[in-house]
Amino acid sequence: MFLQRTEIREPTIEVREFVGEGSVEIDERILFDDEDSHIVLLLEILEGDVTFTLRGPDVENLAKDFADRVRLYIMLPARRAYDAFLEIRARPGSRFRAMIARIGSAFVHATDALSCRACKQVCKLLISTVLAYVGIPNPEDLTPREVLQITAEQSYELDEGLGHAGIRGPLAQGSIGAFLALFADNVRSVVWSALQNAQQVFEPPDRIYTFACRRLGCCP
């Protein structure tokens, strides 16, 4: 069994990420409050037999073209406080990745206050989420010398959602639009530049996030 857990806690954002291999059981509590918390869950089955069970709100899987191996849930602020629970059950020979983020509405005005470590995780969250929404595999899964493959239609969707001062096109709709609105214009545009770079030259995932973080002024 292997389980790596990364946790970021800042005043306006919390991110928990799990990467597991082999026989793993995880039970995570997710708190919804009635103030301004947006909840994002990105769940990825990389290999083998993994079961994700979300006990709580009935929400739509927004990830496209992954045959249920990738699930993306974005939940807007709740009308009342309650708890939800995510259960992860992985059998021997399995691999998975899971990210749980809780973002406050004030986050859009607090980007400059992020630490470098938190900034990288935020860039990773934004990149992974929008790619799952348009049906592009996570950069974490790139092999050496492999570049990020994006179709013209997917590139258009990402450009409209990330590359302009205002969010446009399909990424402006519904809960994905509300999620993107939590990020300042410069954050979205810098992340789009990082993705464009990854289409042209192989970059290990951490280099992609570091590139974006440095452009935002958080990395030394």
Image: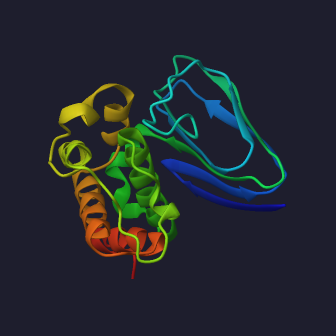
Q: Is residue 62 above or below residue 126?
A: above
Query: Residue 164's spot in the image, x, y percent?
Result: 15, 48
Residue for point 45% across, 52% down:
137
Expressed as whole percent of the image width and height from the top left, the position of residue 147 reads: 35, 68
- The one nearer the camera, 114 or 157, is 157
- In the image, 170: left or right of 69? left
| Residue 8 visible somewhere in the drawing | yes
**What residue is rendered at 50% in x and 49% in y?**
13
Q: Residue at x 39, y 54 (%)?
A: 127
* Camera-side residue of 54 and 12: 54
The residue drawn where x is 32% and y is 68% is: 198
Quick check: 172 above or below 163?
A: above
Question: In the rendered image of this protein, does residue 112 appear above or below residue 74?
Answer: below
Viewport quadrant of the C terminus: bottom left
Can you give x and y, in whole percent of width and height, for residue 1 in the image?
A: 84, 61
In front of the other: 34 or 155: 155
Q: Is residue 116 visible?
A: no
**In this figure, which colouring scheme has been used for the structure?**
rainbow
Q: Is 55 on the left or on the right of 143, as rendered? A: right
Residue 85: give x, y in percent of width and height: 72, 31
